[in-house]
Amino acid sequence: MTQKRDRWPSQLIFIFAAVGSAVGLGNFWRFPFLVGKYGGGAFLLPYLIILIVMGIPLLIMEFALGQRLQQGAIGAFNKIHHKFSGVGLGTILCGCLVSCYYAVIMAWAIIYMFHSFNLGWGTDTKTFFFEQVLHVSSGAAEMGSFNLPILAALAVSWVLVYFCVWKGVESVSRVVAVTMPLPVAVLAVLTIRGALLPGSWDGVLYYLTPNFAALLDDDVWRAAMSQIFFTLTLGFGVMIAYGSYEKRDSDISRNALIVALINSGTSILAGFAVFTTLGFMSTVSGTPIEELAASGPGLAFVVFPKVLTLIPAPNLFAVLFFIMMVTLAIDSLFSLVEAVSATFLDRFPHMSKKVTSFYVCAFCFLGGIIFTTSAGIYYLDIVDHFVTGYGLVIMSLLQAVVVGWYYGADKMRDYINSVSSWKLGPWWSTSIRYIVPGCLTLLLLMSLYRDLTTPYEGHPPAILFGLGWGSVAAVLLVSGIFSYVSSQPEEAAEESASEE
Ligand code: PHE
């Protein structure tokens, strides 16, 4: 017997939850480091173009899928046709892979939270981060030993996430009411603080001055695309699950627009906080901004602590900042656990939510242990590069093709328009049928060419193969087999719409 589907208590809570999922370490840790890596303003333009051309139409599509079919990712695609169940499973698997390393970054933030009471990182924040916190090895080939404090913090992360999510929508609703607005408020304070520092204007210029020549670099486009998928939590099955807790007549396009705008607004604001302070650091230390900005995945943990020690009331700002990083990560992570358990519960309605969520957390914790080794940061960067650049992209491509060509983009658009205040024109169907699949295929081919000809960041091919290509291949293989098995007549699940 199917349980009654969970429901968001109100539209506002739904928006909070979806924004909570979207706004996360992707905005504070990933966005600034990509902006730094790809040369400031050079990254911003492709980012905004991809947001409009692909991000918003796909977010509308994911909300609509969940809300229309009242199922998590696997159930939704299974309902369209059994043979597409694998698309749903693939999105969930990508999400699990991302969560494994995402929780490790949350673990770093927990460690920093403790150090922030006495600003334990001292003046050389780079050495502190890489040597004292990470015990980083010389390269991906040298795995080194497990780092116990990070491992312990990783366990704490998952316990926190588990307790936030274990009652499903009810507890999620309560948690997001705090974890969503708090970071935005702290960010506003930090941005104002950053703007008042001497030299901040140089940082702003670096951040905002567009570089039209960079538009010809396919690597920038690829990074912008993977960032949009990551940041809007697209291709993870999360937005489908969240949409499925909405009533069938809730406004879709307005909600999607609000979520996308708040999310990118937060990223852009976080960029101001980072680059104004980078401008200040560059003025104080005499090091060029480009050099300071190119710290890769360590940027947030090298730059923010540094900046925090240079401003008045450093302890207060530091504690606030790292609490914010942790709360940001929590609501993103539990959105994922929620998506996975929603999917399981659709298929096995007799299972309890607490047990399912426990297994998901335990599984992702175990998967994350490898990132707590001395080579963890390299592995993390590799898995992030491949899973976001291929996994999320392939899954979103398949989703767009299934909805656009099999389910019918116009049929979905009619539904969206029947419940939404902002009516979508034929552009939306065109986007889902042609523009999104076309652009994604092109970028995928370009990425493939680049990654097959140049090893990513010069890492050893065996590790790229095992961790990077291996993760993507595993997702595709398991999803393919699942689709095949699900499309066999005896396996065809008799899904029933749970409501209305
Ligand atoms: N959108 C999240 C962010 O930007 C990413 C994310 C969500 C990752 C859910 C994992 C699970 O941080």
Image (cartoon, rainbow, N blue to C red):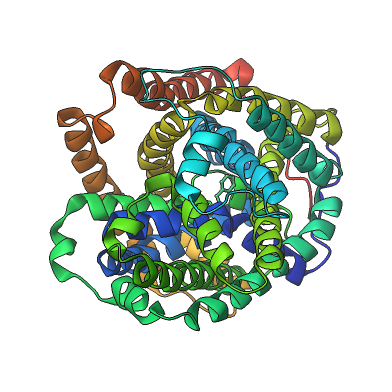
Locate residue 48: give its quadrant.
bottom left
- Number of numbered discs on residues: 0
Residue 23 image position (x, y, % from top left): 58, 60
Residue 441 image position (x, y, % from top left): 26, 44
Q: Is residue 215 above or below residue 461?
A: below
* Quadrant (top left/top right/bottom left/bottom right) for the N terminus: top right
Q: Is residue 376 above or below residue 235?
A: above
- Tell me the residue at 34%/63% (across/down): 47
- Tell me the residue at 35%/67% (across/down): 282
Q: Is residue 90 visible?
A: yes
Q: Is residue 247 visible?
A: no
> Is 261 on the left-hand or right-hand side of 280?
right
* Front in this rendered view, residue 191 or 232: 191
Q: Is residue 354 above or below residue 277?
A: above
Residue 344 image position (x, y, % from top left): 71, 31
- Tell me the residue at 19%/70% (across/down): 211
* Quadrant (top left/top right/bottom left/bottom right) for the C terminus: bottom right
> Is 476 on the left-hand or right-hand side of 289?
right
* Front in this rendered view, residue 88 or 80: 88
Locate residue 305: give its quadrant.
bottom right
Locate residue 174: give its quadrant.
bottom right
* Front in this rendered view, residue 281 or 195: 281
Residue 239 image position (x, y, % from top left): 60, 53
* Front in this rendered view, residue 156 or 112: 112
> Is 485 on the left-hand or right-hand side of 378?
right
- Tell me the residue at 72%/68% (across/down): 182
